[in-house]
Amino acid sequence: MKADFVERVRRRVVNAGTGITFAGVAAAIRDESGGVAGDKDVLDALRLLGQELEGAGPLDPLLRDPDTTDVLVTGPGEVWVEGRTGLRRTDVRFPDEPSVRRLAQRLAAAAGRRLDDAQPFVDAWLPGGIRMHAVLPPIVPAGTCLSLRVLRPAVHNVDTLCRLGTVDGQGAELLRAVVSARLAFVVVGGTGSGKTTLLGAMLGAVPPGERIVCVEDAAELAPTHPQFVRLVARPPNIEGTGGVGVRELVRQALRMRPDRLVVGEVRGAEVVELLTALNTGHEGSAGTLHANSPAEVPARFEALAALGGLPRSALHSQLAAAVRTVLFMRRDGDARRLAEVGVLQRNGDYVKVSPAWRPGERLPARAVLTELLTERGVMPPWTP
């Protein structure tokens, strides 16, 4: 089947103005071929055009794979996938660069966003929990780049994480102790380190009589809990209106009688509202934060608070009173592990994170964590 024939069929289908169906595609193939196309040619063209007109086209099988976390297209012949075995190149191919561009534009339209020469990049959420990012030439001279991240619901509990080796036995007991003591905590780590998975497991350990109100940019958390209420941000439509951001949703969540307020990922000015909530009685609240180490957490909070107009001194004052513990997740190859638990301590006018627990180690700040737990009637998983 020649590429120019397929292109003529594509144009006929798009210009028909009657909606795109497989029957319409088949009729267009017959019309363009003068009715003499063989069954194999019809089926080949139908398959090729069907990929371009529905779903994610040739990327659909990759996205349906339960092990897939990311699908990355850097050119018609370069489609990469990341899963349990890391990043690898696939055998998936696009016919040409325009076909990659068309797929990116169609997915952007499905998300209610614009992607063209005037707006050559887009960051949007697709139905089914897929985050899409695309950039068009000439921003990327080599051709359209398309990135799709598949978000799997975080449904593991603490026992499951222990069996998977994410935490050891003492670490699992420590997680339960932090939840029972209602210590506000932040889970930190790099991209794909398992922050959301750990947070979801800990929320599942919250007593069933407590109400959790969670604010997310995309629905990722799915703890087994009878009082879990989720608010999900909404991006602007194609006209740039109608968006509802995480910061506004945090304000709304505070009016929903939460016992614990959760922000799926703290990434902007909503940190101001979150810290305010943590300082006004919502103990045991939590969130995740991108950081390369626990020591970087105060600086990350500073940067985000600046977006909300909160001065550095005020940020550190609120942070010291609001957040008690920092849980650091590290990715080692295919494994995700709880590498460290830290406590926030004042360092003059500012706050620092001191290591309090690592697997198999006894650290000086363990005494601080022990005191935080015991003063709330919870025994730590070690001898004080």
Image (tube, rainbow, N blue to C red):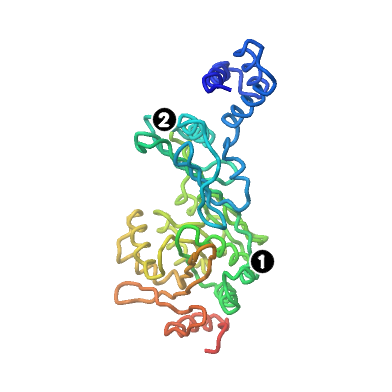
- Residue beneath the point at 59% across and 13% down: 32
Three-letter code, disc 2: Asp
Q: Position of residue 52 (x, y in %)?
A: 56, 30
Residue positioned most to the right: 39
Q: Position of residue 204 (x, y in %)?
A: 63, 65
- Which marked residue is nearer to the observer: mark 2 or mark 1? 2
Residue positioned most to the bottom: 383
Q: CA distance from mark 2 to mark 1?
A: 49 Å
- Residue beneath the point at 57% across and 57% down: 84
Indicate the quadrant where residue 196 lies.
bottom right
* Residue pointed to by mark 1: 208
Three-letter code, disc 1: Pro
Relative to residue 272, is residue 244 depicted above or below?
A: above
Q: Between 306 and 191, which is closer to the camera in this rendering?
A: 191
Indicate the quadrant where residue 31 lies.
top right
SS of the residue under disc 2: loop
